[in-house]
Each structure stands twice: as C-alpha cells, then as structure tokens.
Image (cartoon, grey):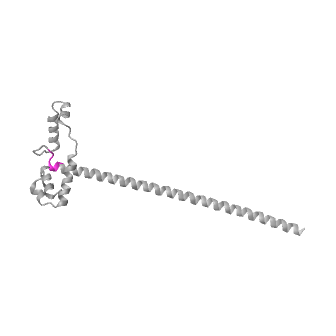
Amino acid sequence: MSDGRLRQKLVQAGYREVDIATLDRDSLLECYAKVVLTETTYVPAKEEQDEDGGNSNEEAEFAEREAGVQHTASGDLSVEERRLAMEERKILLEERRLEEQRLQREEQRLQREQQQKQIRMQLEEQRLQREQQWEEQRKQREIEKKKMERRIEVEKK
C-alpha cells in the first residue's frame, strides 16, 4: 500500500491530516496496524442490543460517557481510545510473554534439579559399589591371611 493510501486510511480512521503528514513510512504502517487491530473488536449489532431491553442504547452511551470513551463523528472510537486499547493489548501480550519466560525458567530449573538428583544417585551407587569391593577385598585378604597362618602352623608341626 502506498504512503498516500496509508495516510488516506488513517484520516478515515480519525487521525488528523496535519499529524500524519510528517510521518515516515514505518510510523504510518505502525499507526495503520493499530487501526486494523482496534477495528477487529466485536461490537454487537443494534438488533442484539435491542433484545436486551429498550434502553440498552442509552445505557451503553451512559456507560461510555462514564468511562470517558469518545466517539468521532462517524461513531468510531476516538484515536486516543484506540491508542489506549492498543497499549492495553501490548501490555497483555508483554505479560503473556513474561509469564511464558517465567514458566520456561521454572521448567529449566526443575530439569537441572532432576539432573542433579540423578547425578547424586549415580555417585551414591558408585560409592556403595566401591565399599562393597573394598569389603570383598578385605574378606579375601582375611581368608588369605588365615590360609597362610594354617600353612605356617602345619609346617611347624
């Protein structure tokens, strides 16, 4: 999409021509992306609102006024509201990203602990095997010693 077309779309979305005239292409694309993201928000049709009761439209307008929501002449949310909605989405995405990172670190920590536990178990098993070998060697030496003592006893007789 050309820069002129981007500017035209942004003006239609509620941006002032004066504000976007000085923006470079990257800024124009960023603003347009914000517009596209905010336009995907679900707004119930008038028939759905009317099913809730006769005053639902007035109630919605009252709630929006109380929340500080401003509409442009075409009935769309103001640029400031769109900006705030976009910022809120960015914050939510950042929170998700941070939570995923935290979960990954936690998983890595658990894996390290499991590996350390396995290493400790292997070392303990090796230690027990060495002790068993030493004990067998000690017993073998005892047996050899007794044999030698008997030989000497027999030779003396």
Residue in the picture at 36% in, 55% down: 101
Tell which of 107 and 135 is nearer to you.
Answer: 107
Q: Name the outermost residue toward the right.
A: 157
Residue in the picture at 15% in, 35% down: 57
Tell which of 117 and 43 is nearer to you.
Answer: 43
Residue 80 in the magenta stretch? The answer is yes
Q: Which residues are magenta?
A: 76-81
Residue 9 is situated, as x and y percent measured from the top left of the image, at 14, 52
Work out which quarter of the rendered image holds the C terminus and state it: bottom right
Tell which of 97 and 156 is nearer to you.
Answer: 97
Tell which of 153 and 79 is nearer to you.
Answer: 79
In the drawing, does residue 105 fall left or right of residue 77? Answer: right
Residue in the picture at 9% in, 57% down: 18
Residue 86 is situated, as x and y percent measured from the top left of the image, at 22, 51
Residue 139 in the magenta stretch? The answer is no
Quick check: 43 above or below 100?
above
Residue 82 is situated, as x and y percent measured from the top left of the image, at 18, 49
Residue in the picture at 40% in, 56% down: 105
Count the labels in the image: 0
Work out which quarter of the rendered image holds the N terminus and state it: bottom left
In the drawing, does residue 15 fall left or right of residue 118? Answer: left
Residue 39 is situated, as x and y percent measured from the top left of the image, at 20, 46
Quick check: 85 above or below 139?
above
